[in-house]
């Protein structure tokens, strides 16, 4: 099992498969995706991803989350899932998506054997959704979710970034509450994180996750106790609700203590932290099947450089200009 010098283990990898995205979320790509002309390396191929996943699985990684950019824009998206599921030893393959064509691909997703899906929906209000993402896609996304449920697809989660004056009112919280009352779906608010490009947005819209935690406490939601390696979401349960609530509060004390994930960018750089300042390329070791041992050795050794905390509270955003390059 991959382990760092602070005793944290890493059974979970977030792998970005593209930087490209069709949405323009204000906190991520407010001007839409712009090609980085200083870096003409292509995104990892399905074959390279397969070799990477095999190496990771031999290092004890059991779960890979495909993210981006928007992972479903890749033409070979379902081929990649197939490779991960059948040829690598990885036990769980999940994705994070903006869901822009979920209504169209729900059946394929269910058939692919994907083990879970996180869908980003910042508001259940169509106008607000459009304001944040610049796309009027909420009805299609909700239709896609309904279809997945009809197909009995399990492990659907919805994430929203908590934004001051946009989706942080009691009314917003009540809307989500009604949504998960009868839906077996987990909904989580993520506290807005400052990124290299997003300082002004952060200053304007950041609100501490405490505001939502207070709502949960006042409405009889109970914290679910999970193990040390359960990841960064603090989950809440309620006996009258089918779904759960969750909060990801990256500025909270001890947030990094439960870190259980590493990140790999779409061009094959290993990132030890979402906000780290180091990122070595491992791509040269993904070219042939017989490089597996060297690949495993390099990744294991890199873990010694993982820092104890992200130091975000000091305004240190590391290499991360926006989260589309590291997959959020
Ligand atoms: N395009 C996909 C999506 O939006 O779900 C996957 C990539 S996106 C970068 C992954 C997650 O990061 C999304 O849930 C998004 O809301 C979140 N995210 C992006 N920028 C963020 C920021 N500055 N602070 C907090 N979360 C952010
Ligand atoms: Fe695209 Fe996701 Fe970033 Fe929104 S958060 S711009 S959907 S990559």
Image: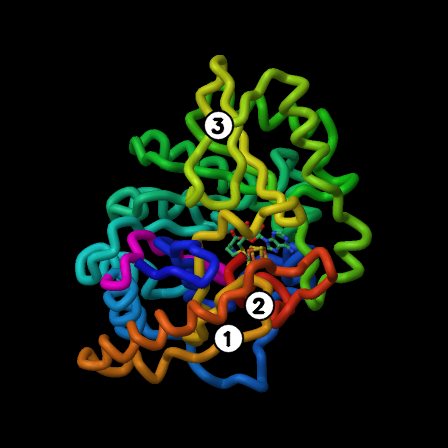
Q: Nearer the viewer, residue 209 or 83?
A: 209
Residue shown at 53% from the left, 26% from the top: 223
Q: Judge whether 148 appears above or below 324 on screen.
A: above
Label 2, label 1: how far apart the Cα atoms are: 8 Å
x and y, in percent, of residue 310 in the image: 61, 60
Residue to which mark 1 is pinned: 279
What segment is highlighted magenta in the picture? 58-70
* Label of residue 276 in the image: 2
Label 2, label 3: how far apart the Cα atoms are: 30 Å
Residue 241 vs residue 27: left or right?
A: left
Q: Judge whether 166 appears above or below 174 on screen.
A: below
Residue shown at 49% from the left, 47% from the top: 258
Q: Are marks 3 and 1 in contact (CB under 8 Å)?
A: no
Q: Are marks 2 and 1 in contact (CB under 8 Å)?
A: yes
Asked if residue 266 shows in the view, the reply is no
Secondary structure category for the residue under label 1:
strand
The reply to whether the magenta stretch includes residue 274 is no
Count all numbered tags in the image, as a single digit.
3
Q: Residues within 10 Å of mark 1 (few under 14, many from 20)?
A: some
Q: Nearer the viewer, residue 25 or 4?
A: 4
Asked if residue 7 shows in the view, the reply is yes
Residue 20 vs residue 292: left or right?
A: right
Residue shown at 34% from the left, 61% from the top: 2
Q: Nearer the viewer, residue 14 or 165?
A: 14
Please identify the quadrant where the N terminus is shown: bottom left
Residue to which mark 3 is pinned: 224
Secondary structure category for the residue under label 3:
loop
N-terminal of the pair, mark 3 or mark 1, is 3
């Amino acid at each position: 099992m991959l382990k760092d010098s602070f005793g944290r283990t890493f059974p979970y990898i977030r792998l970005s498969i593209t930087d490209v995205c069709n949405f323009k979320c204000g906190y991520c790509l407010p001007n839409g995706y712009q090609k980085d002309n200083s870096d003409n390396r292509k995104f990892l191929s399905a074959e390279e991803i397969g070799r990477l996943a095999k190496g990771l699985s031999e290092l004890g990684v059991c779960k890979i989350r495909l993210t981006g950019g928007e992972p479903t824009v890749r033409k070979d998206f379902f081929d990649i899932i197939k490779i991960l599921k059948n040829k690598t030893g990885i036990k769980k393959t999940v994705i994070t998506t903006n869901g822009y064509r979920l209504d169209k691909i729900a059946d394929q997703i269910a058939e692919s054997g994907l083990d879970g899906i996180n869908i980003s929906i910042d508001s259940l209000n169509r106008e607000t959704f459009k304001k944040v993402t610049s796309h009027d896609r909420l009805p299609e996304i909700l239709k896609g979710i309904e279809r997945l449920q009809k197909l009995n697809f399990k492990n659907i989660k919805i994430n929203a970034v908590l934004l001051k004056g946009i989706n942080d009112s009691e009314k917003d919280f009540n809307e989500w509450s009604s949504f998960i009352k009868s839906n077996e779906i987990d909904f989580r608010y993520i506290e807005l994180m400052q990124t290299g490009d997003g300082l002004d947005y952060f200053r304007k819209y950041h609100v501490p996750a405490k505001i939502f935690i207070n709502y949960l406490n006042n409405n009889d939601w109970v914290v679910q106790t999970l193990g040390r390696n359960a990841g960064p979401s603090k989950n809440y349960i309620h006996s009258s609700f089918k779904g759960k609530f969750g909060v990801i509060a990256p500025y909270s004390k001890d947030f990094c203590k439960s870190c259980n994930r590493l990140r790999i960018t779409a061009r094959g750089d290993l990132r030890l932290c979402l906000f780290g300042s180091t990122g070595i390329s491992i791509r040269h070791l993904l070219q042939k099947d017989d490089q597996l041992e060297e690949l495993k050795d390099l990744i294991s050794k890199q873990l010694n450089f993982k820092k104890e905390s992200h130091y975000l509270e000091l305004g240190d955003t590391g290499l991360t200009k926006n989260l589309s390059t590291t997959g959020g």
